[in-house]
Image: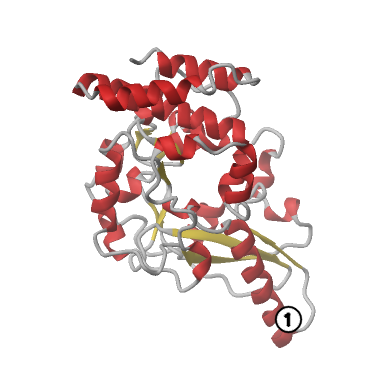
Amino acid sequence: MAAHGLKRARPAELVPGTVRVITARMDYLPAATPADWRQRAWQRLQQPGEAVISVYARGRDYHKVLRARLQQLASQIEQHVGSMGYRVFTDSAPVLEAELARRSAQGWRGKHTLLLNREAGSTFFLGEIFTDLPLPVTPPLEQSSYCGQCTACITACPTGAIVAPYRLDARRCISYLTIEHPGAIDPALRPLIGNRIFGCDDCQLVCPWNKFARRSSLPDFDERHGLGSATLLQLWQWDEATFLQRTEGSPIRRIGHVRWLRNLAVALGNALRHAVQQGDAQQAQAIRHALQQHAQHPEELVREHVAWAQAQG
């Protein structure tokens, strides 16, 4: 954010000549998602040995899918209006996507800061076309929020990252910690991460508006390699070659194998603590044995998190 400064709030500084931004959203729940998907997700979060990956990341990388579709849309617009200057974005540049979407009536900002839509909840991606076409401006929704007195997302956040309505401390957010954060995870936050190894859906799972979440018509977001049902011990066995092969075309690949192991080590430490507390000696021993496999990993980041995990039981 420091590097790009006010470009985030001034589209014409990012793409010279921009006078309008066309915003778009694309649903990502897999087509076969059952009606009780949120309840099932909560159940998996209560099983420490399960590996929980955010729903959006279990299929193909949305950056590639949405960017390609936005490019197609721009080309179709050009067929009607002639050549235009434009550039497409989706979570790939200093763009205030949620705020642009709010201002163009795609929805409103929830208290978790995500965009919410009355017909689709929040399980969608956002994308934009910056253009030099002087298109009519779409006004925002007449009502600035439909959250009312609900604070479910604030209460549900495992790390207390939603510090106030409409305010998020990214440094405590599990999605940031497991995906964007490059270094060691704060030891005080590790127990709160539970078995979440890539992202966190809790604030969306608890949101009443996601009873309207829509299924995607695209096969791109269908689950791959059993990532919606894998255990921590299964994923821990992926060496780097396996990781790269099974995350090809996936948003997970960009964190790399080292951070993948870091995240898994934290979750395994939490699972080990739970197994010891529950008197499950067999599970505890299985986790200890698995952790030992990477106790001497060449990367300090992995070694330190494995040592922490081992100390949990």
Task: Name the one closer to the observer, 33 or 205.
Answer: 33
Find the residue positioned furthest to the bottom. Answer: 80
Quarter holding residue 12: bottom right
Quadrant in the picture for residue 31? bottom left
> Does residue 207 appear in this view?
no
- Identify the image quadrant of the N terminus: top right
Task: In the rendered view, tell whether residue 197 sits above or below residue 275.
Answer: below
Residue 85 pos. (x, y %): 78, 69
Q: Residue at x 72, y 86 (%)?
A: 79
Most extreme residue toward the top, as rendered?
A: 311
Note whether residue 5 is visible: yes
- Amino acid of disc 1: Glu
Circle 1 is placed at which residue position? Answer: 78
Q: Residue at x 46, y 23 (%)?
A: 291
Colouring style: secondary structure
- Residue reaching furthest to the left: 278
Of the pair 185 and 287, the residue shown nearer to us: 287
Residue ID at (53%, 17%): 295
Quarter of the figure that contains the C terminus: top left
Q: Who's the residue at 40% across and 27% down the image?
A: 268
Residue 60 lies, in percent from the top left, at 56, 59
Front-lying residue, 231 or 59: 231
Left or right relative to 89: residue 59: left
Measured as percent of width and height from the top left, residue 110 is found at 36, 50
Q: Residues within 10 Å of mark 1 (few under 14, many from 20)?
A: few
Residue 283 is drawn in which quadrant? top left
Secondary structure at badge 1 equals: helix
Q: Residue 250, percent across and down?
A: 58, 52
Report the label total.
1
